Image: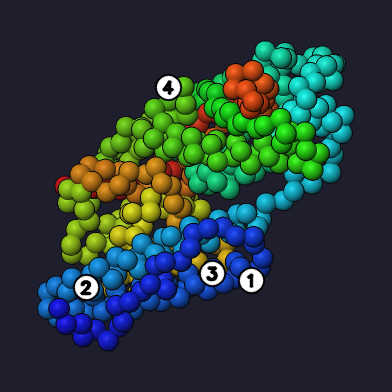
Amino acid sequence: MENDTGIPLETRSVETKSLAVRNLSDSDIGSAFDEFMSAFAAFREANDERLRRIEKHADADVLLREKVDRINQALDEQKAVLDQYVLKNARPPLGQASPRVNVEHKQAFSGYIRRGDEQALRNLEMKAHSYGSGPDGGYLVPAELETEIGRRLAALSPIRAISTVRQVSGAVLKKPFSVSGPATGWVGETASRTQTSSATLAELQFPTTEIYAMPAATSTLLDDAAIDVEQWIAGEVEAAFAEQEGQAFVTGDGTNKPRGFTSYETVDNASWVWGKLGHIKTGVDGALPTTAPSDKLIELVYALKAGYRQNAHFVMNRKTQALLRMLKDDNGNYLWQLPTRIGDKASLMGFGLVEAEHMPDIAEDSLSIAFGDFARGYLVVDRIGVRVLRDPYSAKPYVLFYVTKRVGGGVQDFDAIKLLKFSA
């Protein structure tokens, strides 16, 4: 088929960018950001031509559609690379985030990890009257390592990064919530005052459940004094914890894991009641309407009360974002806007856009797009303490490290999150 778009179909320079994360410098990150901006410019040019073709001929040729899809996919890949660059470059050295370092605990923990020397840790934790530690239950990691794992999880787990995080010392966080305030009324200056009804309180419970990782190391690695053991443990467990958390905060059923916000019962937003999440229907099964599709996004935005919109984010997976990236408003402006600076998020209709890969793909009756103030709507509960148990026996010649922490989560304000349901 003849190509008369005036745009070269070859996009290899955009599509074949290596995804390997190299040794980083400011120039590496700047170069990756420039390439991402160039890729978006190429995408916008090709998609504009596709839309002009549709308006003129009622359809675009196959080659042009394939080109737009290829560049769209390349944009996703380059954004992922850029995010890795920024994250890796921003990680501070362990132990430097807090000026107060318990040197005695740090040295005892290092001895336990490297040589299995339990005595120093046991003496320290007996002095601290710790009930949850020991050779069977695992030893508490130093405070600075626990802080570092928490910081990295916030960077890697998208829902945690935009939600409220609370630390607790018990197994369950119980939170009272006012469902309705006290009744009020107007009254004359000298008229009698009658008693009003009191506020209605409800209690939400957020139990913490155990999440674990079990990295392995050789004795040779642990004997090497040049290796920062705490840095290694944090690096090993961060991805495992973040992957499990990210899925649970979105789809978890609440059984031995946090409860994800998409697992709650939803109702049409016009019939919203406390305890359920409101949804807006697209009017088409498994798709946006072909006419004015952006109107449904606007309806979703304004389904949220004004007080929540100020700090609201869109949440969706990468496939859904790729679809919305092609949409324009009535003035011909793209709804999706690329980040203006390195480290910033892309935006949709002026609101921050967060990629959560465990959000469902667009399908019939799927809840593929969420919009809301997650800082007020979703609560992540961390039980204080990360524990590690050293196991040199089960997988010789490797030494296993059973690292555990307890995490819970769930919706705390059912009016702060709305969902777009792809159904008629």
Question: Dot 2: few (<14), some (14–19), or many (≥20) neighbours within 10 Å?
Answer: few
First in sequence, mark 1 or 3: give its number.
1
Element marked by disc 4 = loop
Taking the spot 78% from the left edge, 25% from the top edge, the residue there is: 115
Q: Identify which residue, 212 or 329, lies in the foreground.
A: 212
| Residue 53 position in % (x across, y down) | 18, 78
Callout 1 touching callout 4 (CB < 8 Å): no
Which residue was labeled with disc 1? Answer: 27
Which residue was labeled with disc 4? Answer: 255
Which residue was labeled with disc 3? Answer: 33
Element marked by disc 2 = helix
| Residue 314 position in % (x across, y down) | 41, 53
Q: Is residue 169 above or below residue 233?
A: above
Taking the spot 34% from the left edge, 60% from the top edge, the residue there is: 322
Label 1 and label 3: CA atoms lie apart by 10 Å
Which residue was labeled with disc 2? Answer: 63
Question: Could you say which quadrant of the image residue 392 lies in?
Answer: top right
Element marked by disc 3 = helix
Element marked by disc 1 = helix
Q: Amino acid at mark 1?
A: Ser
Select label 1 or label 4 by which is in front. 1
Callout 4 touching callout 2 (CB < 8 Å): no
Q: Amino acid at mark 4?
A: Thr
Select label 3 or label 2 by which is in front. 2
Question: Dot 3: few (<14), some (14–19), or many (≥20) neighbours within 10 Å?
Answer: many
Label 3 and label 2: CA atoms lie apart by 28 Å
Question: Dot 4: few (<14), some (14–19), or many (≥20) neighbours within 10 Å?
Answer: few
Q: Identify which residue, 376 or 272, lies in the foreground.
A: 376
Label 4 and label 3: CA atoms lie apart by 41 Å
Callout 4 touching callout 3 (CB < 8 Å): no
